[in-house]
């Protein structure tokens, strides 16, 4: 099974500042077939289901603000919020869809400093 | 707009059974892989199972193999999860989720399953 390790577990950032968190995979999620990274990022606010923000490691979903960006390839990935807004307080999860079983990272909780 | 509405959750004793349902609308249901993902209280997300568009392929996390069965009825735009031999550690909110390929895009609001005596 592919294990995804997210860091840090939690992060406190001032409004307007940059937030960066990481996701490391125990195996590559880069497909040799299509050269795509099978990794997504989700945002989950309290009492709500997760929302897909980023697919294929770096493709922002429709309607997602451009302050959210994803990067990385192979086994190391990053989600960046360029200017933290109050509504970004949430837990962020990475997930791989390269191999079964599909797996999620443990999450990074983002709060306002 | 995609809508996924789960039902069937509740309180069940250890060793008991429960069948979850998910009614889908706003998407061509038969064109999508469908998933069940769960979240124990205060914990992270755990993928449980998925099923191919025509039902010909099913995948499960090891912890539910042999106990849970995923199925779908494309004529009713519905997804199901039959859960048998339930354990305390199966207590969670269960989400129905759709996606292109194995990518999970849209999620329902979830239904709570509590396994307790």
Image (tube, coloured by chain):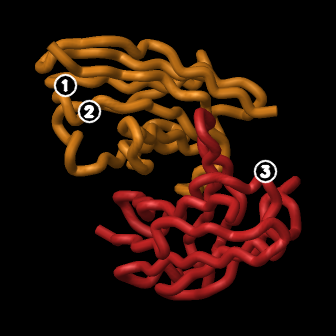
| Chain B colour in the picture | orange
Q: Nearer the viewer, residue B45 or A107?
A: A107
Spot occupied by residue B86 in the image (x, y as percentages of width and height) = 19, 25
Q: Quadrant of residue B2?
A: top right
Spot occupied by residue A87 in the image (x, y as percentages of width and height) = 78, 50
Name of the residue lying farthest toward the front: A113
Q: CA distance from mark 1 to mark 3?
A: 37 Å
Q: Which mark is residue A87?
A: 3
User: Residue tagged by mark 1?
Assistant: B86
Please tell me whether mark 2 sits on a helix, a strand or a loop: helix
Q: Residue at x 54, y 21 (%)?
A: B6
| Chain A colour in the picture | red
Q: Chain of mark 2?
A: B
Spot occupied by residue A75 in the image (x, y as percentages of width and height) = 47, 85
Residues at badges 1 and 2 in contact (C-beta under 8 Å)?
yes
Given this view, does label 1 or label 3 mark the residue nearer the observer? 3
Q: Chain of mark 3?
A: A
Instruction: Check disc 3: other Cα within 10 Å, few if <14, some if 14-19, many if 20+.
Output: few
Q: Considering the image in quadrants, where does the N terminus of chain A appear?
A: bottom left
Q: CA distance from mark 3 to mark 2?
A: 31 Å
Q: Considering the image in quadrants, where does the C terminus of chain A appear?
A: bottom right
């Amino acid at each position: 099974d592919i294990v995804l390790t997210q860091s840090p577990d939690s992060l406190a950032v001032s409004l307007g500042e940059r937030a960066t968190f990481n996701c490391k995979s125990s195996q590559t999620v880069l497909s040799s077939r299509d050269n795509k990274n099978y990794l997504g990022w989700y945002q989950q606010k309290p009492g709500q289901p997760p929302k897909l923000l980023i697919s294929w490691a770096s493709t922002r979903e429709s309607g997602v603000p451009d302050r959210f960006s994803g990067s990385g390839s192979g086994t190391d990935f990053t989600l960046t919020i360029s200017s933290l807004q109050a509504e970004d307080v949430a837990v962020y999860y990475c997930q791989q869809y390269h191999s079964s079983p599909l797996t999620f990272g443990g999450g990074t909780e983002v709060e306002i400093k | 707009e995609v809508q996924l509405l789960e039902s069937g959750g509740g309180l069940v004793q250890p060793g008991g059974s429960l069948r979850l349902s998910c009614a889908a609308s706003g998407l061509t249901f038969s064109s999508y892989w469908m998933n069940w993902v769960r979240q124990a209280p205060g914990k992270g997300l755990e993928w449980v199972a998925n099923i191919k568009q025509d039902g010909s392929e099913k995948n499960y996390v090891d912890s539910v193999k042999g106990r849970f069965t995923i199925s779908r009825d494309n004529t009713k735009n519905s997804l199901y999860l039959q859960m048998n031999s339930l354990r305390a550690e199966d207590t969670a909110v269960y989400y129905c989720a759709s996606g292109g390929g194995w990518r999970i895009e849209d999620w329902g609001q979830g239904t709570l399953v509590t396994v307790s005596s």
